Amino acid sequence: FSLRTFAVIASTSPLLVLYSDGPASRSPEMYQSGNFSDTLSHLPNVHREGGDWTMRRPSLQMLQEYLDRTFGSKQGYVDQTLRPSLKAIMQDVVRSIIRQPGDPHFWPLPGTMKILCFDFMLDENFKLYYHEVNSNCVVFPGYPNLRGAVQEARERALTVESLLFAEELLYRKKYGLSLDPTSFYRWETIKESFDILIDESSTKKP
């Protein structure tokens, strides 16, 4: 499986980052180690390839349901093992790149946010590999068969709700209010789509 997750940097001072699940990807055809010409047995990144897109890009919840059916010993794997591992890697990556010298305009200005897309691979032995992080990514590529209510709600959360969250953070910093994300007016809405990935608000005064 290829896994995509999202980190939304709402603030760099203090560092406050939100986490969101993304889709999982699988090859349309069974992998054949002796046939490298069959692109459908790999993980093609071409939108028109393959037929059943619902099987190609399931959510992590659907991935867990698949594991429940196929591997009885993997019940609870996504919540108890996979997602915590994804988050731990993402935390290390975000902290390492955000503190590197470079163009300050790359990171969000106060009251704005930055979406980072993380890609991982999960092999047949359930070994997780970090592939890359990209700041210039499409939240949900144009798969017409997949753009339903769930995908549109996730896209709105990543592009709209998180921006409103960043704007509220700027307001709170200006007026000396608590920067604890759970105290935000918008937290009840935000927590429906996000977990907190990094919260350094307690180490920095408003």
Image (spheres, rainbow, N blue to C red):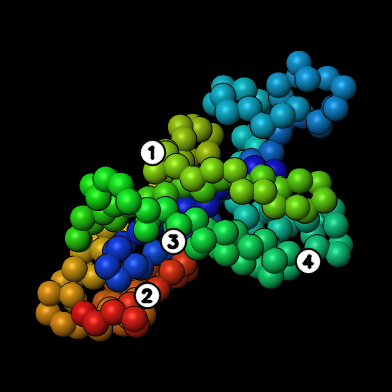
The residue that label 3 is drawn on is: 95
Residue 58 visible at all: no
- N-terminal label among 3 and 2: 3
- N-terminal label among 2 and 1: 1
Q: CA distance from mark 2 to mark 1?
A: 25 Å
Q: Is residue 26 above or below residue 94?
A: above
Q: CA distance from mark 1 to mark 3?
A: 18 Å
- N-terminal label among 2 and 4: 4
Q: Secondary structure at mark 4?
A: loop
State which quarter of the image contains the C terminus.
bottom left
Which residue appears at 46% of the width and 67% of the height? 197
Which residue appears at 73% of the width and 68% of the height? 76
The residue that label 2 is drawn on is: 200
Residue 75 badge: 4
Of circles 2 and 1, which is in front?
2
Query: Hey, what amino acid is under mark 1?
Result: Asn
Residue 5 percent location from the top left of the image:
52, 52
Of circles 1 and 3, which is in front?
3
Q: CA distance from mark 3 to mark 2?
A: 11 Å
Query: Hey, what amino acid is under mark 4?
Result: Gln
The residue that label 1 is drawn on is: 136
Figure quadrant of residue 81:
bottom right
Q: Secondary structure at mark 3?
A: helix
Query: Hey, what amino acid is under mark 2?
Result: Glu
Residue 184 percent location from the top left of the image:
28, 77
Instruction: Give the farthest residue toward the left.
Output: 175
Query: Hey, what amino acid is under mark 3?
Result: Arg
